[in-house]
Amino acid sequence: MLRTVTLLGATGSIGKSTRAVVAENPERLRIGAVVAGRDVEALARVAIETGASFAALADAAAGPALAEALAGTGIASGAGLPAVLDAVARDADIVVSAISGAAGLQATFAALTPGRVVALANKESLVCAGAAVMARAAAVGARILPLDSEHNALHQVLGAEPISAIRSMTLTASGGPFRTWSAERIAAARPEEALAHPNYAMGAKITIDSASMMNKGLELIEACFLFGLRPDQLEVLVHPQQLVHGLVTFRDGSVSAGMALPDMRVAAAHCLGIDGRLDAPPARFLDLALSAPLTFERPDLARFPALGHAIAALAAGGAMPAVLNAANEIAVAAYLERRIGFPGIAALVEAVCAESEAARAAPADVAEALAIDHEARNRARALLSRPPFAVT
């Protein structure tokens, strides 16, 4: 059966991996609609190469340029949030949600329609509104499959086992480019150093999150909602080889590991192969005999305090994960603009969370999640204009 895929975040790293899997399986998969942020040339190229019928950019001002780039191709186009939601509403069996940041929340929520599979790589959808997203999926009969490599590995390891059989789950982390650096050296890290991830080629924001280990904290929060676990059932291990992506410890003491090469096409193939596994090229298979020794270590929260802040937000619950995410997005942008140093990312997140209402309830819908996000961003921007964050 030929499945139609709508690809949100078509020009990013996950979009590239998804496109590769579709291209390898033309008898089972086709791309119907593609969505990106603001890169007109890249999206037009992707739309033409994939044979998409519709292309949309989130940037409303880019509409005329996109239409011009696609003139004569027969591919319809649009721009702005209405166009993104139009893409989501079009017929599709699978929607890949890979728009980075809180911007992907509305599109992900809209993608949850009866019978659909949503391959979720936008972790912020669950961080900002996890309870609402999961409740909506259950109510309409949509199926959420995790596209992040760690959550996908855990999902595969869990199989048909009930959640009640689990003692704990472990997400692995590469440790990022600063895994072996001293606290003093990390404090002086320049953006180009933080962007040098040892294993993956990703977008700037998620790469900085990997360097601070905030990305792993966001993934812990995401896992809580995906698998229905308590915060104390989740932990992180640093595993620089990135061959073991997740571990499930069962109540009887047995441990199962999800393993694969550090290649996002593996997780994408699993999510897209909803009616049976897809074949991968020979180069995508793991050969343990040729692999370096596998090592594991506990994360150092003193050198990577952002992870600790995420763990605290998960424990606090309510709206705090959404606040944490919003503050982090502002902090990462400020760091990339060289307005704050690397330690300023975690410090700003901590300050915004400290000023937030600890008892505020989790958002019940997208509107509430976006309101919380907006408030936290404004708080973060205000703090950036004052000492110790403001540059004088």
Image (cartoon, rainbow, N blue to C red):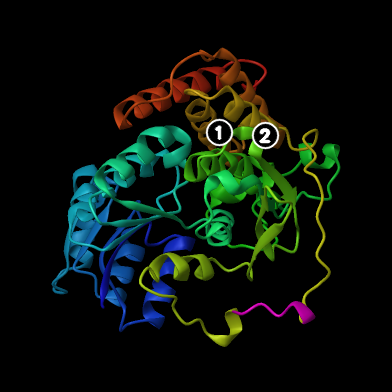
Left or right position of 256 against 127:
right
User: What is the secondary structure assignment of the residue under circle 1?
Assistant: helix
Mark 1 neighbour density, 10 Å: few (under 14) some (14–19) many (20 or more): many
Residue located beneath label 1 in the image: 328
Picture residue at 24% right of the left edge, 70% below the top:
52
Name the foreground residue: 73 vs 287.
287
Left or right position of 273 against 251:
left
Residue located beneath label 2 in the image: 306
Quadrant assignment, res 341 = top right
Q: Residue farthest to the bottom? A: 282
Rendering coords of residue 369 (x, y %):
37, 28
Q: Amino acid at mark 1?
A: Asn
- When the figure is inspected, residue 121 is found, relative to residue 269, above or below; the finding is above
Left or right position of 85 against 267:
left
Q: Amino acid at mark 2?
A: Ala
- When the figure is inspected, residue 118 is found, relative to residue 224, above or below; the finding is below
Quadrant assignment, res 92 = bottom left
Instruction: Determine contact: label 2, label 1, CB under 8 Å.
Output: yes
Q: CA distance from mark 2 to mark 1?
A: 9 Å
Picture residue at 36% right of the left edge, 34% below the top:
132
Q: Residue farthest to the front? A: 252
Q: Is residue 3 visible?
A: yes
Rendering coords of residue 313 (x, y %):
59, 27
**Disc assigned to residue 63:** none
Quarter of the image for the N terminus: give it. Answer: bottom left
User: What is the secondary structure assignment of the residue under circle 2?
Assistant: helix
Q: Which residues are magenta?
A: 285-289
Rendering coords of residue 261 (x, y %):
64, 71
- When the figure is inspected, residue 343 is found, relative to residue 155, above or below; the finding is above
Picture residue at 65% right of the left edge, 16% below the top:
387
